[in-house]
């Protein structure tokens, strides 16, 4: 007879036995170990605060600095006419969209492109400093604030020769501003922050990029402005000579959208305007450059007051000092600016001379051409400046009253001719005949023309290459009238000695290049 209670007991016993056997097998195989237990995670510092106190203080300084200055940094959005697209550059199937009017018969509106950069507010009533290349050619300007408000802006003035522009917005409130420091006081190795507000459109905000770095160098002349102006038909190679390039170099990351943003010191003062990068790709590769704020402030004041820059001039043609120049003129170091010629009716006429070496301006040392140009540019026409020069191997102080630069009085460059003679210095010369004089703009024939400079030769390394197609009038103290005179003048020069080459352009302006004879 079937007993339900006994059957139920047998089932319970079977299940229990099976469970115990399973547990035993799992234990033997290690399946019951705590292999998936939560790991112990700690948040305790691994280094004591005292050991990294200096770094923590610097990090806190960067944070406080960014909080203090970013409210005055704005994004500038520009709208420009897009370059015209020829239907010949478009696939055949799409040409009708470029050549034909709209369906309603109306002509298609001109296309435009949107670009932008950064600026910073310098006055509570809405004046903003930025780069000329940020706003140049814009038909519409908008300035965006951190709270996403934007205002229409207008250009007060722009200067392509320094890449500075001033724009203004009209608001009914007092705006936050940036403090302007003294760029003459910045030192190589000093910490700075480069601040940008690049934007890249309303839907993709990259507001307030803050990067840290140090001042890597001062007085960098990159020829960026000069090259751009030279390629611009409005200016050309003549007017491009008036470009002022005296960049502050930094290793802080600067990319194109940061153009026009402030470079600030650890006291929150603007010492430069982020302006350029040295790159083969168009993005940051380790070198960033800023316009010194002292120069920018001087340009800004003129743009606001006059609408253009009253550009001072000292009235000399200058060149970099090379080791050979330092030896010839008795300089204490390879530093200074060599005066090549003096405008006979300019502000320095009768005071400065060709082959003077300018070593300081109002007591401020001048080591390079770009430094002298920047020092002069920070002053105004009519200012009196004390120029210290080396003359006859000793320093002399001379007072010059600065004139105003005419931007249409730069001598043109003459096209070079084929060379007939080659010499050890790496120069090629030929007689200047009537046809060559006519083509080159010389008032008459006769004499010797510098028709070529060998690449990599001593003359090219000495800077003679810029004087191709100029007349070679003297070597040292010997007058040159023929290629034979050149040979005679050079035959007696030993290797290692310095040769002074005097050249003259069609306007009669004379230059000197001091070149060491190869050994």
Image: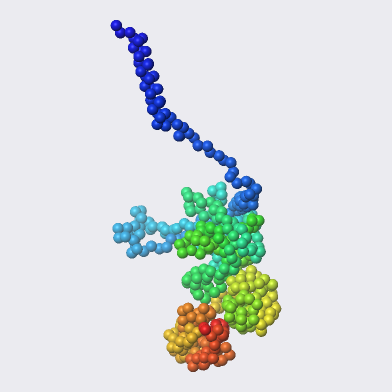
Viewer-proximal residue, 57 or 107? Answer: 57
**Residue 395 percent coordinates (x, y):** 69, 79
From the viewer's perspective, is 432 left or right of 401?
left
387, above or below 269, in the image: below
Quarter assignment of residue 100: bottom left
**Residue 496 percent coordinates (x, y):** 55, 84
Q: Residue furthest top?
A: 1
Viewer-proximal residue, 303 or 471? Answer: 471
475, above or below 31, in the image: below
Q: Quadrant of the N terminus?
A: top left
From the viewer's perspective, is 113 left or right of 7?
right
Viewer-proximal residue, 272 or 315? Answer: 272
**Residue 92 percent coordinates (x, y):** 30, 60
From the viewer's perspective, is 434 left or right of 271?
left
Q: Is residue 277 visible?
A: yes
Identify the residue at horizontal 46%, vertical 79% (top origin): 455
Identify the residue at horizontal 54%, vertical 62% (top origin): 288
Identify the residue at horizontal 57%, vertical 70% (top origin): 244
Quarter assignment of residue 318: bottom right
**Residue 191 percent coordinates (x, y):** 61, 58
370, above or below 419, in the image: above
Identify the residue at horizontal 54%, vertical 67% (top origin): 160
Quarter assignment of residue 317: bottom right
């Amino acid at each position: 007879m079937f007993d339900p209670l006994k059957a139920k007991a047998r089932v319970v016993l079977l299940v229990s036995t099976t469970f115990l056997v399973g547990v035993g097998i799992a234990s033997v195989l290690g399946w019951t170990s705590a292999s998936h237990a939560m790991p112990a995670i700690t948040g305790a510092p691994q280094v004591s605060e005292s050991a990294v106190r200096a770094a923590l203080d610097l990090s806190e300084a960067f944070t406080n600095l960014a909080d203090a200055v970013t409210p005055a940094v704005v994004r500038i959005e520009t709208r420009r006419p897009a370059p015209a697209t020829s239907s010949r550059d478009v696939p055949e199937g799409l040409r009708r969209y470029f050549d034909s009017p709209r369906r309603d018969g109306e002509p298609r509106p001109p296309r435009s492109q949107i670009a932008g950069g950064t600026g910073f507010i310098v006055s509570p009533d809405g004046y903003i400093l930025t780069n000329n290349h940020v706003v140049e050619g814009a038909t519409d300007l908008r300035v965006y604030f951190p709270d996403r408000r934007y205002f229409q802006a207008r250009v007060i003035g722009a200067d392509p020769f320094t890449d500075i522009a001033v724009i203004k917005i009209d608001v009914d409130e007092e705006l936050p501003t940036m403090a302007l420091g003294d760029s003459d006081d910045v030192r190589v190795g000093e910490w700075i922050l480069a601040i940008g507000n690049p934007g890249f459109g309303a839907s993709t905000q990259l507001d307030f990029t803050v990067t840290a770095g140090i001042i890597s160098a001062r007085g960098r002349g990159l020829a960026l402005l000069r090259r751009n102006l030279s390629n611009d038909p409005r200016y050309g190679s003549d007017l491009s000579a008036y470009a002022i390039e005296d960049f502050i170099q930094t290793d802080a990351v600067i990319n194109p959208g940061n153009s026009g943003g402030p470079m600030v010191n650890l006291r929150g003062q603007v010492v430069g305007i982020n302006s350029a990068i040295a790159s083969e790709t168009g993005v940051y590769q380790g070198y960033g450059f800023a316009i010194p704020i002292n120069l920018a402030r001087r340009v800004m004041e003129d743009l606001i007051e006059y609408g253009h820059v009253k550009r001072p001039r000292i009235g000399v043609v200058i060149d970099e000092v090379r080791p050979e120049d330092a030896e010839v003129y008795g300089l204490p170091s390879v530093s200074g600016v060599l005066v090549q010629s003096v405008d006979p009716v300019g502000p320095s006429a009768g005071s400065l001379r060709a082959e003077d070496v300018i070593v300081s301006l109002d007591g401020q040392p001048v080591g390079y051409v770009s430094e002298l140009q920047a020092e002069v540019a920070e002053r105004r026409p009519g200012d009196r400046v004390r120029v210290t020069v080396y003359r006859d191997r000793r320093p002399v102080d001379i007072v010059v009253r600065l004139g105003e630069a005419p931007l249409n009085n730069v001598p043109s460059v003459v096209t070079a001719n084929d060379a007939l003679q080659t010499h050890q210095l790496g120069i090629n010369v030929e007689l200047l005949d009537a046809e060559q004089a006519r083509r080159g703009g010389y008032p008459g024939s006769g004499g010797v023309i510098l028709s070529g400079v060998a690449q990599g030769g001593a003359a090219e390394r000495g800077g003679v290459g810029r004087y191709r197609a100029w007349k070679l009038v003297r070597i040292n103290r010997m007058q040159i009238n023929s290629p034979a005179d050149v040979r005679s003048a050079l035959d007696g020069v030993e290797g290692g000695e310095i040769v002074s080459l005097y050249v003259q352009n069609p306007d009669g302006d004379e230059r000197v290049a001091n070149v060491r004879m190869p050994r």
